[in-house]
Amino acid sequence: MNDEFNVTYLTFSGHVELHRFRFLYFLVMFIVYVLILCSNSIILCIIWIHKSLHEPMYIFIAALLLNSILFSTNIYPKLLIDFLSDKQVITHSHCVFQFFIYYSLGGSEFLLLSAMAYDRYVSICKPLQYPVIMRKSTVSVLLLLAWLLPVLQLMLPVLISNDLQLCRFTLTGIFSLLPMLFILFTYAKILIISYRSGRDVRKKAAQTCLPHLLVLMSISCLSSYDIIKARLQFYFPSTARLIMTLQLIIYHPLFNPIIYGIKMKEISKHLKKLLCEGKLN
């Protein structure tokens, strides 16, 4: 506690051999951050520029990639500063703010994946009603709810916690559970209907749903670790904690653009054109 300015500082202790490898850490994480920004931004620009991609499925993908950029920007600048600093500290208010952004964007990711699952369900299971159900207004409402609901859920705990001495919070976990159950139910319905339908329907389901499922499995595994560590307070060696944390902040933000850039046919086509011919439109 700094009595002169009445500011509480918290010290980070999760770094491994930082005094020996601080410049290596900085260089690697800086390169990763640039890669995250570039890879996600390129796919975002492709979707933004090409009107043929202005469909609900691609709009939700763009929102998911934007979410990854915001998530990384909440973490990396402070992380890079810490690598070059003698002391790895953060003010209590800044810690609360990072917590708020971290978990609100995490919640938004699950809600965006839920919206994508619903979009695929309507497209595959109710194709004739798709234009009526998935109108621009529907997409706008789903996007608004995906970003607004986590903010509203975390607002009160953050305001209360801001007056506490310790930067530590208790989460119920129910918020992540409900979207997960909805997503699993939706894709189960898609799987059943696709199995009963013709080859074209199964092919469409495989092509458009597989990338979403891969992203879902990725974020679910990493979120499970976060919940186990925070809620159950299991002991993890410092090296293991560092590796799992790096998986969350490095692997997943890079995983999304790679999966959607390779697996989504229309995005992949425009991406290859950009890489081979240098043309974005």
Image (cartoon, rainbow, N blue to C red):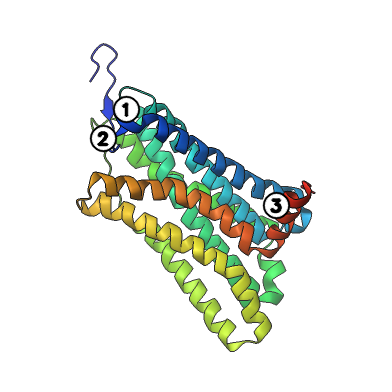
Circle nearer the N terminus (1, 2): 2
Residue situated in front as seen by the camera: 231 or 111 = 231
Relative to residue 111, is residue 11 drawn left or right? left
Write the residue at 50% across / 47% down: 148
Relative to residue 114, is residue 241 drawn left or right? left
In percent of width and height, residue 68 lies at: 52, 46
In percent of width and height, residue 174 lies at: 34, 58
Alpha carbon separation for disc pair 2 and 3: 41 Å
Alpha carbon separation for disc pair 3 and 1: 39 Å
Relative to residue 274, is residue 25 drawn left or right? left
Q: Which residue is mark 3?
A: 47
Circle nearer the N terminus (2, 3): 2
Label of residue 13 in the image: 2
Label of residue 88 in the image: 1
Write the residue at 37% across / 39% down: 99
**Amino acid type at mark 3:** Ile
What element does badge 1 sit on? Answer: loop
State which quadrant residue 8 falls in: top left
Q: The N terminus appears in which quarter of the rendering? A: top left
Write the residue at 37% across / 30% down: 22
In percent of width and height, residue 109 lies at: 49, 53
Contact? badges 1 and 2 (CB < 8 Å): yes
**Nearer mark to the viewer, of 2 and 3:** 2
